[in-house]
Image (cartoon, grey):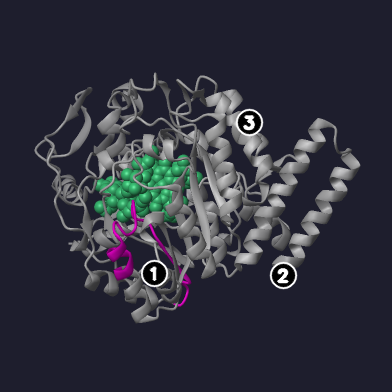
């Protein structure tokens, strides 16, 4: 019998700027978004992420909105990234006897989908990890228009999160989700295989655990059984993945779960169990990647890479021993980099970008967050990494309960003093499922980006963020939302000096926008400065 074919859709991101709309509309949305926009770089009516500026200067193109170039690989595009969940499904299902058509990004591949749906696949699978509800609905509605009746199966992180904390979403959207089967499981691959078998045989999935769907018009949920497979159970055959699905960087997971319980983070509730890949498995997987000459960089995507100092050394040791032909990056806690030997090992191992979860330089805020670290740890890690010329990017949260103008100023001073290369500064998002959510201690009210507590509200916080930007423009990442642009730039061969110049230029352009609005710059002078800044950047990029 011919194996059945499946269509997998993995992502739908179009730009860094989408992160604000990832969350439900806030009461003060207009104003918060307005303030957020004031931190973005606008040229002739278009908003430019850092990679957009490179595309503009090197290829002469403006940010792509709806139209996507026919050779997306020639540009730095957030819509042309690679997501691990999608590649995992592609590889896993192929090895389990299915023929899989793969769409890495719905946004860029809408035109291909119709012909793939015309092939009448057994099912269309959507990975929700990098989707928000709006994007998910858009994909489902599009599929319904393309080919009514083909089962749609949705699994991945968004579903796990919504089912845990916001079950109403499914019931609410009955009309839209009527023909959809949701897999509610942090992993879900076992459930998926059983479900596909049932679809093949044309039998009811009622006895398969971890499913949510509408049955005879009513919301129906089968039993819940946590899948217990080890993280080592499946190694992606990176040497077999079609070239078109690879990028010059690839995501790799070395572990699942986090032993910490920071009060702003949902991971501690969603991914309690710690599961570490063995050295053998990790080495094997990285060796398969090393066979692909296209790959220049490996981005570790664990919740927390290196849950301990010894684990960090173990991972770096594998990289060093094998002398892989790629650099790597990771999200790290600063308290895992405490001495010169570790920093030197990281350098030798090829670590080119360290993203540190710093959050704040104020001890009181770190304590409120139960971050279990100190500003001294942050300063030390930054210094050690910078001494080795590893690019250091810091993640900061602004507005957590206890935050005041003074604590924000302390963080600002800490950023300047530390000399950190770049900061990703985010408004605190009060997420359902995080330990702090619903806390009564701080008089906390509201959720997502619309909150208030005893010392601040989200609107004031955004105003402070704008002030903060003016103090530290050169280090301020400006709402890019994540470290992906840095990974893309490094993988494309840009040096740390070029990357810093890119962000500095972007900041100077934004600073001039403020001056223009305040009347401190004339339009003519603003344009002259803009051209000069872009020219200087172009020279350094070449
Ligand atoms: C790595 C990562 C990133 C990287 C992405 C790099 C990349 N290109 O891959 C970066 C740092 C860029 C990033 C950014 C953001 N991220 Co992020 N990120 C993650 C993280 C830590 C890992 C994702 C991953 O690859 N996991 C490994 C893969 C293998 O796991 P998986 O996708 O879950 O797939 C498994 C199963 O779910 C299952 N599965 C997957 N799909 C399907 C489909 C079906 C049908 C079935 C049955 C099973 C199934 O199979 C896989 C194997 O078990 C997750 C948290 C987490 N632990 O997953 C957050 C997470 C995905 N990110 C999240 C968020 C919110 C963001 C940001 C919006 C943050 C922000 N405020 O800026 C931005 C997005 C910006 C943008 N414009 O896109 C949320 C998403 C929640 C949601 N969808 O609503 C998560 C879940 C974290 C959280 N709990 O808050 N992120
Ligand atoms: S913020 Fe980082 S260290 Fe803290 S619980 Fe979340 S993943 Fe773990």
Q: Is residue 177 left or right of residue 59?
A: left
Res. 35 mark: 3
Mark 2 = which residue? 542
Mark 1–mark 3 Cα distance, whole angstroms, equals 40 Å
Residue 11 in view, yes or no: no
**Label 2 close to label 1 by CB (< 8 Å):** no
Q: The residue tagged with tag 3: helix, strand or loop?
A: helix
**Residue 541 percent coordinates (x, y):** 70, 66
**Magenta extent:** 293-314
Quadrant in which the C terminus appears: bottom right
Against 313, residue 44 (above or below) is above
Instruction: Name the residue rendered at 33%, 24% in the picture.
Output: 439
Location of residue 177 (image quadrant): top left
Residue 244 part of the magenta-drawn span = no
Q: Residues within 10 Å of mark 2 (few under 14, many from 20)?
A: few
Q: The residue tagged with tag 1: helix, strand or loop?
A: helix
Mark 1 = which residue? 342
């Amino acid at each position: 019998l011919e194996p059945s074919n499946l269509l997998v859709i993995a992502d739908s991101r179009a730009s860094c700027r989408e992160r604000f709309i990832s969350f439900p509309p806030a009461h003060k949305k207009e104003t918060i978004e307005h303030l957020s926009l004031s931190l973005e770089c606008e040229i002739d009516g278009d908003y430019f992420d850092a990679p957009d500026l490179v595309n503009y200067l090197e290829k002469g193109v403006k940010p792509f909105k709806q139209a996507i170039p026919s050779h997306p690989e020639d540009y730095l595009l957030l819509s042309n990234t690679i997501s691990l969940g999608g590649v995992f499904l592609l590889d896993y299902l192929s090895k389990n006897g299915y023929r899989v058509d793969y769409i890495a990004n719905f946004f860029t591949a809408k035109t291909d989908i119709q012909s793939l749906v015309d092939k009448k696949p057994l099912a269309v699978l959507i990975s929700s990890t990098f989707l928000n509800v709006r994007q998910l609905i858009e994909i489902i509605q599009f599929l319904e228009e393309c080919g009514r009746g083909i089962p749609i199966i949705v699994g991945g992180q968004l579903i796990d999160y919504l089912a845990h904390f916001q079950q109403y979403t499914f019931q609410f959207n009955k009309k839209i989700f009527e023909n959809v089967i949701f897999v509610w499981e942090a992993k879900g691959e076992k459930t998926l295989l059983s479900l596909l078998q049932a679809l093949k045989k044309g039998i009811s999935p009622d006895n398969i655990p971890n499913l949510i769907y509408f049955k005879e018009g009513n919301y129906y949920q089968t039993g819940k059984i946590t899948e217990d497979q080890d993280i080592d159970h499946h190694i992606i055959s990176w040497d077999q993945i079609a070239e078109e699905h690879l990028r010059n960087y690839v995501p790799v997971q070395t572990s699942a779960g986090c032993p910490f319980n920071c009060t702003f983070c949902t991971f501690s509730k969603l991914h309690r169990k710690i599961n570490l890949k063995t050295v053998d498995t990790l080495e094997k997987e990285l060796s398969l990647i090393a066979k692909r000459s296209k790959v220049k960089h490996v981005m570790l995507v664990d919740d927390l890479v290196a849950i301990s100092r010894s684990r960090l050394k173990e991972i770096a040791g594998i990289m060093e021993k094998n002398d892989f032909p790629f650099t790597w990056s990771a999200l790290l806690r600063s308290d895992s980099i405490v001495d010169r030997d570790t920093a030197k090992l990281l350098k030798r191992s090829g670590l080119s970008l360290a993203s540190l979860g710093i959050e704040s330089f104020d001890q009181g805020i770190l304590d409120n967050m139960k971050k279990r670290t100190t500003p001294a740890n942050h300063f030390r890690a930054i210094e050690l990494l910078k001494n080795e010329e590893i690019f250091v990017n810091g993640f900061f949260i602004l507005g957590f309960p206890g935050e005041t103008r003074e604590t924000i100023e302390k963080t600002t001073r800490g950023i300047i003093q530390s000399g950190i290369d770049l900061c990703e500064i985010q408004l605190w998002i009060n997420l359902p499922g995080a330990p702090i959510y619903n806390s009564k201690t701080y008089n906390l009210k509201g959720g997502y980006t619309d909150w208030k507590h005893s010392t601040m509200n989200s609107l004031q916080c955004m105003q402070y963020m704008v002030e903060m930007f003016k103090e530290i423009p050169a280090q301020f990442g400006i709402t890019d939302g994540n470290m992906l642009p840095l990974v893309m730039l490094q993988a494309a061969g840009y040096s740390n000096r070029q990357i810093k110049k890119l962000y500095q230029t972007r900041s100077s352009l934004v600073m001039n926008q403020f001056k223009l609005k305040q009347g401190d710059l004339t339009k003519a002078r603003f344009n002259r400065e803009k051209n000069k800044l872009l020219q200087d950047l172009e020279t350094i990029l070449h």
